[in-house]
Every structure is written in structure tokens, then in C-alpha cells.
Image (tube, coloured by chain):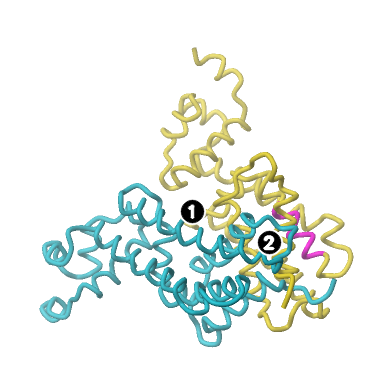
Chain colours: A cyan, B yellow
């Protein structure tokens, strides 16, 4: 009965199941037994694909990190005024969060108890620093209000964007473009029409 | 050696220790044994004060919820244009988050596994709804930009504000007033000076 499943099992489907289990139970709370049950394949079949759960974690957070870092290489992130570039990066970050939701969720929940987790945290900080540098450049250009501390603004921007993984669920009528528009409008232009 | 501690123990100090342990280990992961060790008093001494860890959780999240709901009764929250009221509530919410940081942190991490947790979640949703209603009223007044969905804006605003519990640590030079200013400026006026 399970032969079909086993035959069609690929590293990608295993990864997708593992990420779901990690997000539900927490990485620390997940055993190979849990993964084996959720995937419907034996532990030894899992070991055929990966050395253990830490490798699955590394592959999963790599997928999220690769998506995020790729944004920083896109033309919109490297050309033009800093304020336009940081708006572009914010918009695309939201889109990556939505398209890679379970992977980014896992990345944002990583605590730092294992080598892989510490590596993921460091890469995440590196991404945050690059965005912070863009915000600093935009402030230096005079394109950001001077009465908000840039470090605070960076934290608040990431707080807003990263909160998406906690509450955003894809549904018809709210595409990632509308979501990205809302984030960019709110963060850069504000909600208010009058003063 | 522990007599002095025991004699000076009050329900408030026990609550403060319990909240710290809940935030570190998670509520589910905390036993009476952990609380007893952290407080430096016996389990029976704890039972002298409370019926168990769920009562400590209820007292802790009540403190956070009481602080948040009190904001909604303040003059700045009930008088004037809706947009001014929602700005006021946002500012004061940040201040309550900072002054009651461990209690609000615990509140925001509540999952809903016990009756007390489900009650806390429901009260939190009630608070969120009241703020959402203020935002709707401000939008109806034409004081909020029409191109951002109000439900999305509410989620993003809470995402930004609630993220504070994850990264804000009190330190000299960044008071809660500066923080509240930054949140209000960013959410309502935007970071950008030019278009």
C-alpha cells in the first residue's frame, strides 16, 4: 500500500513535510519518529535522503535565505536612489515571505540551539544589516524623516514584515501584491491622509 | 539561609518570578518544580499563595490585559477625531508594552491549550477589535488612505507594535516615549519625506 508513496518520494516532498512538522512541533520538539510518521515512510528511508533532522533544517532555512538574499541582487535593489531600493526590497521581501511562507516561518522561529540554527540566525542578521544599510543611505540622502532613529525604524519595519508569518494565510482576494502594497504604503507613506 | 527570602515573599514577587520562567520555558514547559526552584521556595509555599500554575498565568495575563484595556478608557482614546484617538491608543499601547514588558510578552505568546489561555486569547482579540473599530471610524472620516485595506492595516499595525516584545530591551537613551513616537510616525505619517 505504501509502495506508491515510497516510489514517488523525493527529497523535496520530504523537505516540505519536515518543514510543516518543525513549524507545528518546534524544531527541538521534533524527533525522527515524528518525521517518519508524518511522511509515511520509515526512518531508514529518511536516512536514505538525509543524515538527520539537522540537514532537513539546513535545507529548509537555506531555501528561505536564498529567496531573501536573491532579492538584494535584483536590479530594483541595486539601482536608483536608496529610498526606492529599500521600498523595492521591502516589497519583494513580502512577496518572498508569501511564496515561501512555511520556510520563512521556520527561519524566523529558529532559536540558536544547534550549529545550523546559529548559522541561520547569523545569515538572517546579515540580511537585516543589508536592509538597515539601505535605510541609512536613504536617510543620508534626506529621503527619510529625520525624527525617527534608523535603528528603530529598521526594527519596526522588520517587526511589521515578519509578523506576516504569524497571521497571513493565502486566500482569494488578497494576493501578495496587495499585501506588499499595504506594507510599503504604511511604512513609507503612512496611513494618514491629513495632519 | 532561605528564611529571609521566604518571609519576604509576596504574591507579587512570586508572580514576577513565574512570568520570567513562563517566558523562558514556555507555559506548557513549566512545572511547579521549575517555579519552586526559580522562586527559591517550596512547592507547598507556592500552593499557600495560589492554586497552581494556571492561576499564576491568569494573574499575569490579567495584568497585561488590564493595562491595555485601561488605555481604551483614557480621555485621549474616547474624545476627538477617530484618527487622533487611534494614534493616541497606539502610542499608549507601546507605553504599556514597555512598562509591562514581561506580562505582555507572556500574553502575546499564549497559545490556547487551557481555559485560561483561551480566555486570554479572547480578551486579546476583543482589544484588537476595539482598535480595528477606531481605524475603521478614522477611514470613514476620510483621515486614512483609501488604498490600504483596513483589516490589513490593523494586522500590520499590531504586527509592528507587538514585535516590540521580541526585540525591545530597555536601555538608556531610548525611552518608551521615543519608541512610541517612532511607531506613530512610521504607521501614520510614514518614513518617507519625499515622493
Would you place residue A58 above or below residue B18 in this image? below
Q: What stretch is highlighted in magenta?
A: B85-94
Would you place residue A146 above or below residue B138 in this image? above
Q: Quadrant of the C terminus of chain B?
A: bottom right
Res B13 → quadrant:
top right
Q: Residue at x 67, y 66 (%)?
A: A141
Would you say residue B88 sits in the magenta stretch?
Answer: yes
> Is B41 on the left-hand or right-hand side of A181?
left
Few, some or many residues within 10 Å of mark 2 (<14, 14–19, 20+): some
As drawn, the label of residue A117 is none
- The front one of B123 and A102 is A102
- The front one of B110 and A115 is A115
Q: Is mark 2 on a helix, strand or loop?
A: helix
Look at the magenta stretch and give its main secondary structure: helix
Q: Name the residue under label 2.
A: B127
Q: Is mark 1 on a helix, strand or loop?
A: loop
Amino acid at each position: 500500500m505504501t509502495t506508491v508513496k515510497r516510489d514517488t518520494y523525493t527529497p523535496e516532498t520530504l523537505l516540505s513535510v519536515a518543514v510543516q512538522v518543525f513549524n507545528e512541533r518546534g524544531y527541538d520538539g521534533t524527533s525522527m519518529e515524528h518525521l517518519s510518521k508524518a511522511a509515511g515512510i520509515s526512518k531508514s528511508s529518511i536516512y536514505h535522503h538525509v543524515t538527520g533532522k539537522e540537514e532537513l533544517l539546513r535545507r529548509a532555512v537555506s531555501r528561505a535565505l536564498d529567496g531573501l538574499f536573491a532579492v538584494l541582487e535584483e536590479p530594483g535593489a541595486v539601482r536608483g536612489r536608496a529610498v526606492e531600493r529599500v521600498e523595492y526590497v521591502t516589497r519583494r521581501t513580502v512577496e518572498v515571505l508569501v511564496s515561501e511562507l512555511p520556510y520563512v516561518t521556520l527561519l524566523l522561529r529558529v532559536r540558536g540551539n544547534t550549529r545550523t540554527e546559529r548559522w541561520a540566525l547569523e545569515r538572517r542578521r546579515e540580511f537585516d544589516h543589508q536592509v538597515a544599510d539601505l535605510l541609512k543611505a536613504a536617510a543620508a540622502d534626506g529621503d527619510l524623516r529625520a525624527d525617527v532613529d534608523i535603528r528603530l525604524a529598521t526594527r519596526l519595519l522588520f517587526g511589521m514584515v515578519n509578523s506576516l508569518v504569524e497571521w497571513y494565510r493565502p486566500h482569494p482576494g488578497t494576493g501578495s501584491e496587495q499585501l506588499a502594497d499595504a506594507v510599503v504604503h504604511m511604512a513609507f507613506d503612512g496611513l494618514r491622509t491629513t495632519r
